[in-house]
Image (cartoon, grey):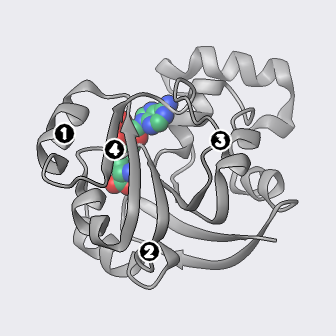
Amino acid sequence: MNNLPDRMTILKNTPLYKGGDLLIDVGCATGYFEVALNHKYKKIIAFTPEEWEYKKAKKEVSRFNNVYLYHSSFGNFDFKDLQADVVYLGNCIHYIFQEYKGFDFVPQLIKISKKYLIIEYPYDINLDASDMKVLKGALQAKGIDELFTKENILKQLKTEFDLIDTLKSGSTTREILIWKRK
Ligand SMILES: C[S@@+](CC[C@H](N)C(=O)[O-])C[C@H]1O[C@@H](n2cnc3c(N)ncnc32)[C@H](O)[C@@H]1O
């Protein structure tokens, strides 16, 4: 991931690094945040749908008995009644948006976030790219309100959360949105 040391430095000032009982790291890539944060949480649940990432992460985190790693997307993950102190979505909300073809994942996200929700908001999806035709069609069928924009992310979450901070991040990420449950 580009600029990882920079991003980690920026994230050090957020609730992600304060720790707690449970962290859910959505789209955990190769497990670098689990390596960095395992000593701060009683338990970390992390998952990625990418098989190569999952395999690499598995090797990285096998030495930590409080890190639970899964090979899954957000939509396929069985959250049961889990509620985390911190839910972290690092540069992956746009993929979840694509998986659900809209914001239907938000109620689940709200349900699992007990205190803080940290979203690293990436560049806008280019809906005119050739691999986005299916998504674009699905979104158009749903109406303009469903488009993946920062305004719509804010609108989806602000009924349950207060946006307590917005940080600038490295070149692969525009902003880090820090939310606290009302
Ligand atoms: C750009 S990487 C970011 C990795 C890491 N969270 C970070 O901030 O450095 C995107 C991650 O999201 C994962 N991802 C892609 N689609 C996903 C989905 N539908 N549900 C959950 N994670 C997904 C990818 O496998 C990858 O691990």
**Dot 4 surroundings within 10 Å: few (below 14), some, or many (20 or more)?**
some
User: Label 1 is placed on what type of residue?
Assistant: Lys
Label annotation for residue 58: 1
- Look at the numbered disc 1 and give the secondary structure of its residue: helix
- Residue 29 in percent (x, y) is at 30, 44
**Dot 3 surroundings within 10 Å: few (below 14), some, or many (20 or more)?**
few
Name the residue at 40% across, 77% down.
17
Q: Is residue 9 above or below residue 42?
A: below
Q: Is residue 60 above or below residue 145?
A: below
Label annotation for residue 73: none
| Circle 2 residue | 19
N-term mark: 3 or 4? 4
Q: Is residue 176 above or below residue 164?
A: above
| Circle 3 residue | 81
| Circle 4 residue | 68
Q: Disc 3 to disc 1, how far (Cα)?
A: 24 Å
Q: Quadrant of residue 13?
A: bottom left
Quadrant including the C terminus: bottom right
N-term mark: 1 or 4? 1
